[in-house]
Every structure is written in C-alpha cells, then in structure tokens.
Amino acid sequence: MHLPFQGKIDRAHKFQKEQKAQRGQPSGYDEELSPSDVMEKGDGCAMAIAALITFVPVALVALAAMCAVGYFFLIR
C-alpha cells in the first residue's frame, strides 16, 4: 500500500537516521543506569512529596463524593 507523501516520509526517516548516527550517543550516557544512579540526594523525597500533593487531594475529593452519594441514598 502506497501512502500519500511516502517519498517525503522515507526521506525524513533517512535524514533522522543520518543525524542520529552523526551525533552518536551523548557523553556520559550509559544504557545500564538505573534511576537511582541519575537522581540526586533529595530527589526521592521530593518525588514522594510531589506525588502526595498530587494524589491525596484527588483521593479526598473522590472519597467525599462517595460519602455524599451514600448519604443522599441512605439518609434522604
């Protein structure tokens, strides 16, 4: 199946491959690095706090909504 503009797409893919080959891998890049090797000392704690700030309010709103629905079905 021949897509419209297939020649342009192929040329763009070829150009990207050539550019990637010319650049090579960035200095200091290692495929076997784990996230803990790249993170700084306080990053784990900061990520945990950011997750709590993000998810706890949403969970509280969802819990309040479920409680309100239960209240209106059972009490009213």
Image (cartoon, grey):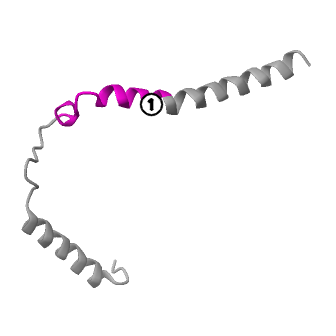
* Front in this rendered view, residue 48 or 24: 48
Corner quadrant of residue 12? bottom left
Q: Secondary structure at mark 1?
A: helix
Q: Which residue is mark 1?
A: 51
Residue pictured at 36% horizontal, 30% vertical: 46
The percent position of residue 40, horizontal first and vertical second, equals 22, 33
Q: Residue at x 34, y 25 (%)?
A: 45
Q: Is residue 61 magenta?
A: no
Local crowd at mark 1 within 10 Å, few (<14), some, or many (≥20)? few
Q: Residue 48 sits in which quadrant? A: top left
Q: Is 15 left or right of 4, judged from the image as shown?
A: left
Q: Is residue 35 left or right of residue 68?
A: left
Question: Residue type at mark 1?
Answer: Ala
Please name whichever residue, 65 or 45, is drawn nearer the observer in this view of the structure: 45
**In which quadrant is the C terminus drawn?**
top right
Q: Check residue 43 for magenta coloring.
A: yes
Left or right: where 59 falls relative to 74? left
Q: Is residue 54 above or below residue 10?
A: above
Q: Residue at x 52, y 30 (%)?
A: 55
Q: Residue furthest front?
A: 42
Residue 75 on image: x %, y %:
89, 15
Residue at 48% in and 27% down: 52
How far across and how far down the image is residue 16, in percent? 19, 71
Residue 72 found in image quarter: top right
Q: Please give the range of residues in magenta.
A: 34-52
Residue furthest top as drawn? 75
For the residue pair 67 and 47, the one nearer the viewer reads as 47
Q: Is residue 7 above or below residue 13?
A: below
Residue 36 is situated, as x and y percent measured from the top left of the image, at: 21, 30
Q: Judge whether 16 appears above or below 47 on screen.
A: below
**Which secondary structure type mostly characterizes the magenta part of the structure?**
helix
Q: Quadrant of the N terminus?
A: bottom left
